[in-house]
Amino acid sequence: MNVSKNRRALTMLCMAAAMAALVAVGSKIPDIQIPSPLGTNRFHLGNVMCALSGLLLGPWWGGLAAGMGSAVFDLFDPLRIMEAPITFVTKGLYGVVAGAVYFKGFKGKSNYVNEAVASAAAAVSYIAVYMIKCFLYNGLLVKGLAPDAAWIATLGKLPSSAFNGIVAVIFAPILGVALHKALKAAHLEAKPA
């Protein structure tokens, strides 16, 4: 096998592992509980790191890093441990969409606007999938709520999900532009196939 292909694969694996760790830590920090009339929601920086994973690593490695880091976070929380496989898929989607829009749509051209649009597309897709998951899994299956009550409970999660998404759209591109510049200087830029 080609040495440069092996080096590239190893580099991407190491970068994905580092991003997965940042996603897991970002999902815990700052972990601010936001009270609402329909229950408590939380603010965290995990979504910023999920979007950043896609922006730096591309759709597949970025999706893997976002999904793995978020699932690891769930595995260490007794209240979320059963949702780890679902989280792997939903948060993985965050990285896949951010990476696909950035690398396929904008051809990996690093600037704030391109990375913000990719992050926004990822946030919107994640929020839609998360709302469906909250309705079907949390509302209907786990809590056994009637459909109307499940929708009301699901809509209670929308404000914090939207806030976390907006924070990701603002801050992931700032970090992305800076890190793309640094990775390019170090000849470590991702070039997904």
Image (cartoon, helix red, strand yellow):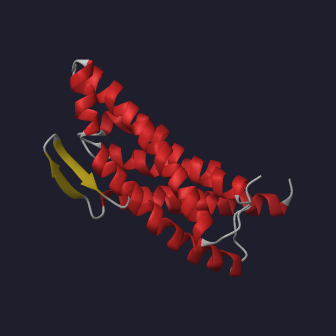
The answer to whether 155 is drawn above or below residue 57 in the figure is above
**14 relative to 38 in the view: left or right:** right
Q: Quadrant of residue 188?
A: bottom right
* Residue 26 seen in render: yes
**Which residue: 35% across, 35% down?**
83
Q: Nearer the viewer, residue 99 or 76?
A: 99
**Which residue: 53% across, 43% down?**
93
Q: Position of residue 28 (x, y in %)?
A: 30, 58
Q: Quadrant of residue 117?
A: bottom right
Q: Position of residue 95 (x, y in %)?
A: 55, 51
**Which residue: 64% across, 53% down?**
101
The answer to whether 111 is drawn above or below residue 122 in the figure is below
The image shows a total of numbered marks equal to: 0
Q: Nearer the viewer, residue 74 or 160?
A: 160
Q: Nearer the viewer, residue 59 or 81?
A: 59
Q: Residue furthest right?
A: 2
Q: Position of residue 34 (x, y in %)?
A: 19, 54
**Which residue: 59% across, 74% down?**
177
Q: Position of residue 141 (x, y in %)?
A: 29, 21
* Residue 16 seen in render: no
